[in-house]
Amino acid sequence: MRFFCQLQTRADAERALDCGADVIVAQGTEAGGHGGTRATFTLVPEIADLIAKRAPGTLLCAAGGIADGRGLAAALMLGADGVVVGTRFWACEESLVPAPLKLAALAAGGDDTVRQHLLDIVRKRAWPARYTGRVLRNDFVRQWLGREEELKARRISRPSATRPQRKRPISGIAATIVGEAIGLISSHRTGRSDPRTHGRGG
């Protein structure tokens, strides 16, 4: 059995090494979903240097903002042994993500994502405060971002009024959990590259 640990800070990496982690995934803030505030470009080499000094046998994977061969090459140059890719596979043809959410994401770019606590509030998920979740900006996010306390109050008094719909995945309401790498993706295609994407990870 192998011990994998995904983390977002050097301090967490030190603790993971103390616990005997076999593989560390250094996740930058560019990633979709829950994460921290450190950027992939600086976090990965810092942890790579730490591993080289303390536990050379531990493998390091980079995550956050990686969607194509350029990201992989950059991660390897930063000292990673490999990468963890999320958004590229989220958007692929084979994924089970509802079509309306995929279409909304593919029409957006990295600037259209934001880190927030709203999703945890409406889902009543007690994530530690230092972790935020990156999602695509939509009507729900624009309505409530910066009004978290009001959302909490309404969530308690009128749960159904603030809960994003799940049965009908409407892109303006449902959480579209993607990273900044969505700006590098222009189609659902997988397998052979499409020359029409001009290197945008299509």
Image (spheres, rainbow, N blue to C red):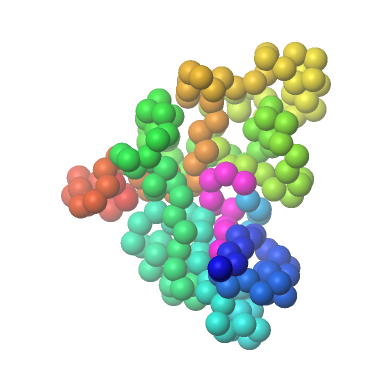
Q: In which quarter of the image is residue 163?
A: top right
Residue 41 can be seen in this image: no
Q: Quadrant of residue 129?
A: top right
Magenta segment boundaries in residue numbering:
25-34
Is residue 147 or residue 22 the one in the foreground?
22
Residue 50 at x, y percent in the picture = 64, 79
Image-based side of 99 in relation to 40, left or right? left
Image-based side of 3 in relation to 147, left or right? left
Image-based side of 92 in relation to 195, left or right? right
Residue 193 at x, y percent in the picture = 22, 52
Whether the magenta-drawn stretch holds residue 182 is answered as no
Q: In this view, does 151 lie above or below 29?
A: above
Q: Is residue 4 above or below residue 120?
A: below
What's the residue at 48%, 54% (across, down)? 65
Residue 5 at x, y percent in the picture = 61, 63
**Residue at the extreme front:** 1
Residue 175 at x, y percent in the picture = 55, 30
Q: Image quadrant for the N terminus?
A: bottom right
What's the residue at 44%, 68% (across, down)? 82
Residue 82 can be seen in this image: yes
What's the residue at 37%, 39% (across, down)? 95
What's the residue at 51%, 19% (across, down)? 167
Q: Is residue 191 above or below residue 187?
A: below
